[in-house]
Image (cartoon, rainbow, N blue to C red):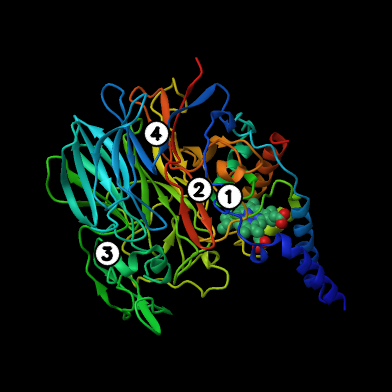
Amino acid sequence: MKTLNYALLLAALCSTSCYSFRGSKGGGQTTAAATRQASADDILLPAGYQIEIVAEGLNYPTALTTDDNGGLYVTEAGYVYGDVFTTPRLLRLNNSQPEVIYSGDKNGPWTGVTYHDGSFYISEGGQTAGGKMLKVTRDGKASVLLDSLPGMGDHHTNNPVIWKDHLYFGQGTATNSGVVGPDNADFGWLKRFPTFHDLPCEDIVLAGVNFESNNHLGTGKANTGAYLPFNTASRPGQTIKGCIPCSGAILRIPLRGGKTEVVAWGLRNPYGLALDRTRNKLYVAENGADDRGSRPIFGAPDVLWEVKEGAWYGWPDYVAGLSLKDHKGFKAPGSAPLKPLLLKEPGEVPKPVAKLGVHSSSNGTDFSTSDQFGFKGEAFVAQFGDMAPNVGKVWKPVGFKVVRVDPETGVVTNFAINKGKHDGPASWHRARGLERPVSVTFSADGKSLYVVDFGIMLMRDGQVLPQPNTGVIWKISKKS
Amino acid sequence: MEVMQKIRLIIILALFVSLQAACHRNRTAALEGRPVINSERLKNGQVMYMRYCESCHPGGLAGLGPGILGTPSFLKRFQVRHGLGTMPAFKKETLPKKDLDDIILYLKAVKKASK
């Protein structure tokens, strides 16, 4: 009897407070109106800093760069989750209307831009024709530096960084954790590219683990192995040939043109590639795995990595430097225990520089280079914010802010947050602050930090609902 | 019921009650540079917190998991070692006692700073 009483009390309490019984409360899960009125008044910064609006009404802006004269240029994505296509554009921000420098094809999302030696280098995600690297002159003449990158899946071809006469960029994986499944049908790409899958950079040997799901390309059931097309099973000991370009990697090409090289691989979605000029090292913010699809993973943080040449970072059998084999806690509630997909590990996995919020979507990153701005040598990371419940459940909204990370200690500290009791986008707060910061860029003199705020993206009834023309560019600087 | 089982249940109940009671915290402390990290133990606590806890309880507040600043220290220890519910457990081999002690100390400082 006593046991029953305990159990009843427990159940009653659980219904409001324990993870398994709670509904998800992500930042996009709001019934707020999808209109935006931005104001710096609703944002909190450390003492001595100020934030102002530079531009509003942009259509899914993703990245910002500056030219030699301090001119500001912004990319608009042209593709957004929810399978929404618009025109990707490179804009110059003026005091009045932005000026269109170049409009791209229906092959977004444009994820990043950098200016170098009189030209813009743009990463084109590749949702319809594969990822590309574009070079665009100041007067809007475009050429393709690189194409046929595997960007048609969940993750795309990511932002370029120019360093040591090379153009470095991240290439995301096709899938969440190595296996094409129902979540990829939801994204929209599986029907467009029914045979698309992940590509390793070097030869790998599979353990032969297969996953049953509904057959989203036909009827009945499908059985799918890792690094293989949907409904293609794998065998134990099966070798998958490495190739270049591959997915889940940092790649580079010589600026003068030449062969694509692998810098590092075994990453999931290496979104925020950034050069730390203080240490002369490359870092990348990686989006960790989600609780979705045929091989869901629970509690995977986003990670800031130092990019080490030749290293394998562990995807799809490691999360944040920890093997899924040894760390049972990554098993998603209600799903089968995780088995390694690879028979042999291609290398030793490095340790993260820092772990960032699970589902925070830690994206564009840049390093402070000046004592005038402060926090010299620290990484600033734009956190787009959770896409719960599609990525998994959260207790409260995660991200929707800018954090700074000390690469020496891995300590993560809030830098720009919305006012209120919790983290969450302005729409969720029914206020006017930050919505979804997607990248950050320091000005050439290092004195200001520009924050690209993608705009409103709601999550309702399993649908991703981005709201057009709600993007904002913010500028943060020290008060004089 | 076995004694151990009883203790377990009571702890689970206490955890849920402590969650219900979790009061709202001021989120500006970190922006203002608080808590001040002025001892080796606090420094280690902060680094260990970042390594093992921050990704699910950012700044001690709710994220993937619930806010934990209001949870009594003995319950924090129990939860970390036993991982009730969906949270993974952290055994001594991964997180030695000294490091957990420092995490608890760090969380106390964060709580004090955010009142």
Whole-Å distance between the Cαs marked 1 and 3?
33 Å
> Which residue, given by chain and number where applicable, does mark 3 sit on?
A199
Identified by mark 3, the residue type is Leu
Q: Going 74% across and 47% down the picture, which residue do you hit?
A: B70
- Characterize the local packing of mark 4: few (<14), some (14-19) or many (20 or more) Cα atoms within 10 angstroms: many
Query: Which circle, 1 or 3, is nearer the viewer?
Result: 1
In the displayed structure, would residue A105 be above or below residue A371? below
Where is mark 2, residue-wise? Answer: A385
Camera sees residue B83: no
Near mark 2 (Cα within 10 A), the count class, few <14, some 14-19 or many ≥20, is many
Specify the quadrant of the image occupied by residue A63.
top left
Q: According to the image, label 1 marks what residue?
A: A397
Q: Mark 1 near mark 2, Cβ–Cβ under 8 Å?
A: yes
Numbered badge on residue A367: 4
Alpha carbon of mark 3 to alpha carbon of mark 2: how far? 28 Å
Q: Residue A303's spot in the image, x, y percent?
A: 44, 49
